[in-house]
Amino acid sequence: MAQIKVFTFILLAALVLFVGHDEVDASKCCAEHPIAGGCTNDKCNNYCQDQCRGGICKHRNGKLGCHCYC
């Protein structure tokens, strides 16, 4: 009986860790980010592509930033 409880605890802990990890990654998409050395569409697209559909430089509130697509 104790083995089942330990296995269940480990399984639930792993599930919580994986769910939390996905939420952190998704926070990059649909948002603006500063790019070191100034924003260019190539830099921005490369920055966003690992977790989003890519990105493009946009002016927001008088500043040029990298917007990662949703």
Image (cartoon, rainbow, N blue to C red):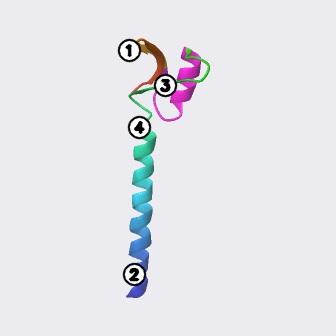
Q: Is residue 21 magenta?
A: no
Residue farthest toward the front in the current orientation of the protein: 62
According to the picture, the residue beneath numbered tag 4 turns out to be 27
Residue depicted at x 52% and y 29%: 49
Q: CA distance from mark 2 to mark 4?
A: 35 Å
Q: CA distance from mark 4 to mark 1?
A: 21 Å
Looking at the image, tell me whether mark 2 or mark 3 is earlier in sequence order: 2
Within 10 Å of disc 2 (Cα), the crowding (few <14, some 14-19, many 20+) is few
Task: Give the residue type that dot 1 points to.
Answer: Asn
34 sits to left or right of 61: right
Q: Secondary structure at mark 2?
A: helix
Which dot, 4 or 1, sits closer to the camera? Answer: 1
According to the picture, the residue beneath numbered tag 3 turns out to be 54
According to the picture, the residue beneath numbered tag 1 turns out to be 61
The magenta span reads: 41-55
- Please state, as top left, top right, bottom left or bottom right, where the C terminus lies in the image: top left
Task: Give the residue type that dot 3 points to.
Answer: Gly
Task: Give the residue type that dot 2 points to.
Answer: Ile
Residue farthest toward the right in the current orientation of the protein: 37
Q: Are marks 1 and 3 in contact (CB under 8 Å)?
A: no
Q: Secondary structure at mark 1?
A: loop
Q: CA distance from mark 3 to mark 4?
A: 14 Å
Residue depicted at x 41% and y 52%: 20
Looking at the image, tell me whether mark 2 or mark 4 is earlier in sequence order: 2
Residue depicted at x 51% and y 28%: 48
Residue 4 image label? 2
Within 10 Å of disc 3 (Cα), the crowding (few <14, some 14-19, many 20+) is many
